[in-house]
Image (cartoon, rainbow, N blue to C red):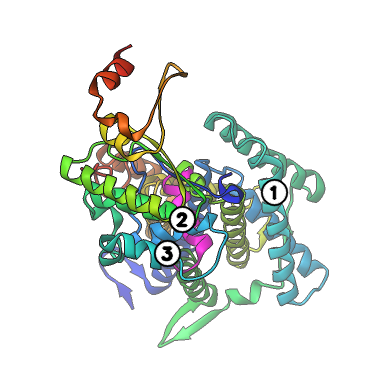
Amino acid sequence: MSRARGIALVPEGRRIFGELTVEENLRLGLAARRTSGDPFERVFELFPVVKEFRRRPAGMLSGGQQQQLAIARALVAEPDVLLLDEPSLGLAPRIVDVVFETLAAIRELGLAVLLVEQRAQRTVALADRTYVIANGELRLTLGPDDAADTQRLMEAYLA
Amino acid sequence: MTLALLNIDWQTLADALSLGGIYALMAVGIGLVFGVLRLVNFAYGQLVMAGAYALAYGSQWNLPVGVSILFCFGVVLVLSFLMDVLVFRPLRGQSPAVMLVATFAVAYLMQSIALLAFGSLGTIASSVAPLNQPWDIAGVLIRKIAIVSILVAAGCLVLLKLLLDRTSVGLQMRAASMDFRTARLLGVRANRVIGGAVLLSGLLAAVVAVLMTVRSPLVTPSFALTDTIVVLAGVVLGGLTRLVSATLGGFAIGFASGILGGALPTNQSQYLPTFLFAAVILVLLVRPNGLFTRGGGAVERV
């Protein structure tokens, strides 16, 4: 379904195939790929960890490494739009830093990133536009400058 | 020469190994489809039956053995394909119970068609029978088919393993059997992996049909029916969720039936299924997830 449209998803909870190797997980990402060339070069550059452990079963990786693998797996399809569903879920704060740095780097690659996140302040700081949605209703639109405005964030959340 | 312990001779041992091999192939065939569809295909034995009829009619029409075997493969593959397109695909979104009952219906339908078309008395596949002749190996007589079955089964399993490990459709099949939804989200095409698994399982059914028809050339509408039930027990015994454990389960139950069948006095061989199923129940009481599975699920990593 995502195949022809250039959309790739990093699902909630990472959804790594733990019994497959890291490289096999990446190769699954190729199912939706529409271009040719060395598929892994770019993601190995972005995620040295993925390259280093590519022969290991993915289930042996730490949560943060698995999250990087999940993002790498979506990127090898070379999508125009990358969707991420709560990539910081269940990760240690230090690892969350890594994930957000990665997202910033991915944005520099020139693809559109749609991120659903609980970490409001960091997300607002990263994104060009942040939409606060409650019960399916658009409550608020924020820009990067609003990240420091905790008052507005709080109100948006608790309203 | 005998293995003194159970009074088992080499012929029995070779027969048991070959039955184990054949059942292992059937177990893989059932396990492949279960992997991608979460569906136990009860009509699997009827695919084997159809292949056996193809061989029987091949020999009635005096086709060369090779052509008969090709005909058998053709019939089984076409039926597998039809089963996929007409039954599995339309029902894929339905509950497991619906699909289970559907495969029961397909099984009985195919058996009834065979009964109407070919009669209940059976047809003999004589052209493949010469493989039943014994070979004299160092003074021990062993039926050719026993050795051929062991080699063919081993060969098929190795090829299948290579296919699953080395090709992209194999990788996609393995991923789909672990987590179908995520595989689809990554762009894996459902029809491709399911069709692939169904055709592979059909290929294996055709191989099994050839091997079984040599072992017992009288082909009736209930051909391979009992075997399928025993294999299903073996597959559950080994652990249905993994291909390797399902295969081992199939092999184990085939080997055990072969050995028990040889060890039991002829007038008591009717009790063989009783012993087998009692053993299955005992094993499942102790290891409900299967004999050859590792304990515990995946650990969530943080």
Which region shows up in magenta? Answer: B165-180
- Secondary-structure class at tag 3: helix
Question: Is residue B39 shown to the viewer in this render?
Answer: yes
Furthest residue in direction bottom, as rendered: B138
Count of marks, rendered view? 3
Q: Identify the subunit bearing mark 3.
A: B
Badge 1: few (under 14), some or many (20 or more) residues near its Cα, within 10 Å? many
Badge 3: few (under 14), some or many (20 or more) residues near its Cα, within 10 Å? many
Labels 2 & 3 near each other (Cβ < 8 A): no
| Magenta stretch prevailing secondary structure | helix
Q: Nearer the viewer, residue B61 or A121?
A: A121
Q: Amino acid at mark 1?
A: Pro
Labels 1 & 2 near each other (Cβ < 8 A): no
Q: Nearer the viewer, residue A142 or B206?
A: A142
Question: Is residue A118 shown to the viewer in this render?
Answer: no
The residue that disc 3 covers is B16
Q: Amino acid at mark 3?
A: Ala
- Quadrant of the frame with the C terminus of chain B: top left
The residue that disc 2 covers is A29
* Residue name at image x 65 percent, y 41 percent: B89
Q: Nearer the viewer, mark 2 or mark 3?
A: 2
In the rendered view, does B98 fall on the left or right side of A156? Answer: right
Q: Are marks 1 and 2 on the same chain?
A: no
Marks 1/3: CA distance?
25 Å
The residue that disc 1 covers is B221
Q: Amino acid at mark 2?
A: Gly
Magenta-drawn stretch contains B166: yes
- Secondary-structure class at tag 2: helix
Marks 1/2: CA distance?
46 Å
* Residue name at image x 34 percent, y 64 percent: A44
Task: Check the image and report above or below for B190 versus B258.
Answer: above
* Residue name at image x 70 percent, y 44 percent: B111
